[in-house]
Image: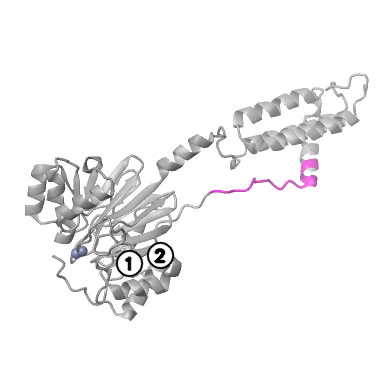
Amino acid sequence: MEAEAPPHPVPRPSLSHSPPLPAIQQSSNSKFPRPHLPRNLVGSFGGSLVDSLRPALPPFDVSASWRIASAISSINGHDGAWPSIILISTLNIECSMFNPNPAIPQFPPLPRPKCRAMGLTYLVIFLSLGAMPWETNAAPKQEPSQSTDSMTNSEERAVKITVAYDNYECNPSLQTAWGFACLIQAGHSTVLFDTGGDGPTLLGNLEALGVDPKTIDAVVLSHPHHDHVGGLRSLLETGVRPPVYVPTEFPAEFKREIGLITMLEEVERPLEIAPGIHATGRVGTGIVEQALVVATPEGNVVITGCAHPGVSNMVYAARRIIEGEVTLVMGGFHLRSASDAQLRAIIHDLEAMGVQRVAPCHCTGDHARSFFAQAYGTNYIAAGAGWSITLH
Ligand SMILES: [Zn+2]
Ligand SMILES: [Zn+2]
């Protein structure tokens, strides 16, 4: 039963004193690194070296140098050898100017000491450049995909989230009742988060949504209140046996009963339920609850059942599991008795954590919903039973 009054103050994470959030991975867009090589350095370095080695120098052969540069390029397989190629091309041109035998225009042996000096200088430089640990900027070359393939890939990566049970109405073909359930369809996985307060409403709504219970791969329960677990037994009575994931703190009797019917897994720490779908594990110390974090092409979605530990604490826990922007927080926010000051503080926390959109429903409360609507403007979503979003 939904009997608890919200704690006062509404729990919030201490953002300023908490350990740093996981670093958001920056997409590497490094520029091609070019070393600074002053002209005088090239000249003096090559000159002194050549002076000491001159007696042993063979006639410099440009074509051999070109082959060496090409070999470096093929071995390194990255942009690092390109400066060598450019340098050796320059050498080719410069040495051609000293070519004592114009009758042989292509890569003749050049006996002049000056060309030998230049040759050795450039050789040392491009060997050095080739050996440098160049930071490659080149993305793996991919064959241009066909448009149909792109569409297929895009469809496969798309994530559809549907509120299957809620006390707010969105789609009149679904029943409303006190409780919450949400269906996540991502790739080849279908996960049901919470099961609402009763079986007939849940099963009827799934049917109205065109979802066969057999397609549900896993059930994740946020917390043991009846309005979130009430539809589970009816779901299992249809004959399906999806694994059920519950926080460790669920009542022993519930765990024993469900464990006799299907696989029941207790979750304490963050757990990947399906590719890109994580349970946060236990959050809070009073009514322990877990949220679901869904990675989508548009960012992460955090889904809360009731958010008894505080919606910002749920988002905070989610942000510590997977990196990336939080594009949407949805579900029950449990703010029916929150004051305006508390609501302002929570909205501030969510904004500080980069929450872009909110879709509060279930136990959020009408006043809190209108408060969020005012604060988030067009990024506020009035979710309810039958509301659905596809992120791709
Ligand atoms: Zn609850
Ligand atoms: Zn609830």
Q: How far from the left and from the top, in percent, is residue 89?
A: 78, 32
Q: Which residue is mark 1?
A: 312
Q: Is the image coloured rainbow, by chain, by secondary structure, or in one colour?
A: one colour
Q: Which residues are magenta?
A: 28-43
Q: Which mark is residue 341?
A: none
Tell me the SS state at disc 2. Answer: loop
Quarter of the image where one finds residue 138: top right
Quarter of the image where one finds residue 156: top left
Q: What residue lies at 49% left-to-right and 35% top-to-bottom?
A: 149
Q: What residue lies at 35% left-to-right and 63% top-to-bottom?
A: 359
The extreme top residue here reads: 103
Q: Nearer the viewer, residue 77 or 150?
A: 150
Is 253 placed left or right of 11 in the picture? left
Quarter of the image where one finds residue 55: top right
Callout 2, which amino acid? Answer: Met
Q: Quadrant of the N terminus?
A: bottom left
Secondary structure that dominates the magenta span: loop
Q: Which residue is mark 2?
A: 353
Say few, some or many: other residues with alpha carbon within 10 Å of mark 2 (under 14 / 14 to 19 / 20 or more).
Answer: some
Callout 1, which amino acid? Answer: Ser
Q: What residue lies at 33% left-to-right and 62% top-to-bottom?
A: 383
Which corner quadrant of the figure contains ligand 2? Answer: bottom left
| Lower position in the chain sequence, tag 1 or tag 2 | 1
Q: Nearer the viewer, residue 285 or 367?
A: 367
Pointers 1 and 2 in contact (C-beta within 8 Å): yes
Is 162 placed left or right of 100 in the picture? left
Q: How far from the left and from the top, in percent, is residue 61?
A: 80, 23
Report whether residue 292 is seen: yes
Report whether residue 267 is seen: no
